[in-house]
Image (tube, rainbow, N blue to C red):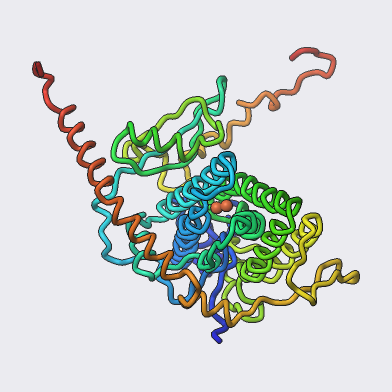
Amino acid sequence: MSDVDATEAPAPQQEFDALIDADSRIEPRDWMPEAYRTTLVRQIAQHAHSEIIGMQPEGEWITRAPSLQRKAILMAKVQDEAGHGLYLYSAAETLGASRDELLHLLHAGKQKYSSIFNYPTLSWADVGAIGWLVDGAAITNQVPLCRCSYGPYARAMVRICKEESFHQRQGFEILHTLTGGTPEQKAMAQDALDRWWYPSLAMFGPPDSDSTHSEQSMRWGIKRFSNDELRQKFVDMTVPQAEVLGLRIPDPALRWDEDSGHYRFSEPDWEEFWAVVKGRGPCNEQRMTHRRRAHDEGAWVREAATAYAAKRAAAASQPTASVA
Amino acid sequence: MSTGSDFQAEGGHGAIPTEGVPAREPGHSAAREWPLWEVFVRGRRGLSHVHAGSLRAPDAAMALRNARDVYTRRQEGVSIWVVPAAVITASSPDEKDSFFDPAGDKVYRHPTFYEIPAEVQHL
Ligand SMILES: [Fe+2]
Ligand SMILES: [Fe+2]
């Protein structure tokens, strides 16, 4: 019965395909096509890089947070992003990549991170806008990834999504507080929305008509929705929230379309998007310089911890002669 | 303007180019890396420790501290085990094989296998 199938594909490939077709999960020690492994390593690595680079724009505001409570909240959020990076580097390691190697690729500029983090945080309202819009867009991207076909990636995303919800709500609350404040505070919130709206829309990537290679990822259960579908979902969720804030989305073409049940909106400036991707964003240089410096300046800590562990291990393996 | 590039929205925190981006760095040595630890967390009293994830640390004490910071920031645990990944013996090279087959034809191990007259109570 299975003889006929056996001539079509080798048995491990058949098992892999069967698991994918059944919407089951692939686990680290399963056989998998090399291209599946490579695609996942690259995607998970760049996702991890985005989490840790993403600590920078908000980290700049920790010392300038308007109250002790806001400061504690912001530290907790930035620490979460470090944790997200760690979950994801761990997931990449289950595929055979090494953490050292991936960090090296980031520092060498060969692997990238999300372009959104190449924009500056000019005011306290930007911290709110990032939580509300940037983490909101991240949630829209990440929720479908909780059902990703690769088990360790999906499990990391479940943890991350739970934590992102706090990020988005604290961001919204910052803006809500500002919009309920003085005219200057409200203007500050509007200014942040004006600057972060289109970069947030661009987080979903180029229009479907321009991104040609996602079919394979769809087939593999790594990608579940197209860039445009995710962007639409995000806009539909966000516009009513802006109304609650009393803020104006900086898009004169924005309107509710009764027929489709969706908002119609303007595309981001894709020329700008590509320029930022290619390294010409306002903060690309700054983010990379800071990341490399943090890594280099932490070298002595890593070395000291290694030396201490080696010394303790050596002492433990000595016969317990009288020490004193 | 460049188009047609492979962009995955599922970069998570945003779309990131994948075309022309290497996944690995052949020949890069990971010799200096700290050992890998598997982390198990007991959610609350009365529950077993459950695998939460993994991390790298130079020794057991640091692994525990890092595990606390990475996996229990929201009171997800009352107890943590860290185990060097290298000492774990696993059942099989993949997640399904004949190792588990012997259990497949022993339905009589389940209570539902047995037919009991309907009038019998508490059985
Ligand atoms: Fe995150
Ligand atoms: Fe976040």
Q: In front here: B9 or A63?
A: A63
Left or right position of B17 against A174? left
Residue A146's spot in the image, x, y percent?
61, 52
Q: Is residue A177 visible?
A: yes
Left or right position of B115 against A22? right
Give the position of the C terminus of chain A as an image quadrant. Answer: top left
Left or right position of A289 against A164? left
Residue A254 vs A107, above or below: the answer is below
Q: In front here: A317 or A59?
A: A59
Q: Quadrant of residue B87?
A: top left
Residue A92's spot in the image, x, y percent?
44, 55
Q: In front here: A7 or A269?
A: A269
Q: In front here: A194 or A218?
A: A194
x 48%, y 76%: residue? B19
Q: Residue furthest right?
A: A258
Residue B94's spot in the image, x, y percent?
45, 48
Give the position of the N terminus of chain A as an image quadrant. Answer: bottom right
x 61%, y 80%: residue? A270
Q: How many marks?
A: 0
Residue A210 vs A168, above or below: the answer is below
Q: Is residue A144 visible?
A: no
Left or right position of A289 against A91? left
x 61%, y 64%: residue? A223
Residue B10's spot in the image, x, y percent?
58, 63
Residue A9 vs A54, above or below: the answer is below
